[in-house]
Amino acid sequence: MNFEENMEKLEKIVQELEKGELNLDESIKKFEEGMQVSKECNKMLEEAEKKITILIKKEDNTLEEEPFET
């Protein structure tokens, strides 16, 4: 699954939990599933962040690639 699909899945899980129609066991399972999907999304974001670079234009009009820093 890609990031967007995982986010949609996470939104559906949240909606199901917010409805309050699940019993305790089902709620716990949905919560655990949501936590797993959330971890996957976070991992995807971290991997994307590693790939990001900033191109800086030097005075002599050449470009230099630098790693993204937060």
Image (cartoon, rainbow, N blue to C red):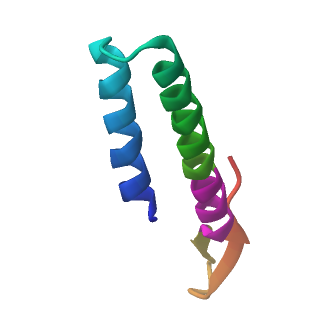
Task: State the image quarter where residue 22 is shown.
Answer: top left
- The answer to whether 24 appears left or right of 66 in the picture is left
Q: Is residue 26 magenta?
A: no
Q: Residue at x 53, y 19 (%)?
A: 25
Residue 31: x percent and y percent? 53, 27
Residue sitting nearer the eye, 59 or 65: 65
Magenta-drawn stretch, dominant element (helix, strand or loop): helix
Range shown magenta: 43-52
Please report the residue visible at 60 percent of the width from the left and 72 percent of the height from the top. Answer: 56
In this rendering, position of residue 23 left or right of residue 34:
left
The number of discs equals 0
- Relative to 6, say whether 50 is above or below: below
Vertical side of 53 occupied by 63: above or below: below
**10 to the left or right of 68:** left
Q: Left or right of 33: which side holds 43?
A: right
Vertical placement of 41 versus 25: above or below?
below
In reply to whether residue 45 is colored magenta, the answer given is yes
Q: Return the x and y of residue 27 as percentages of the image width and height.
A: 47, 20
Residue shown at 41% from the left, 39% from the top: 10
The foreground one among 45 and 28 is 28
| Depicted 5 relative to depicted 59: above or below | above
Of 23 and 10, which appears nearest the observer?
Answer: 23
Where residue 49 appears, as percent x and y from the top left, is 62, 59
Residue 20 location, quadrant: top left
Residue drawn at the location 58% of the way across and 54% of the way down: 45
**Residue 13 coordinates in the image, percent (x, y):** 38, 33
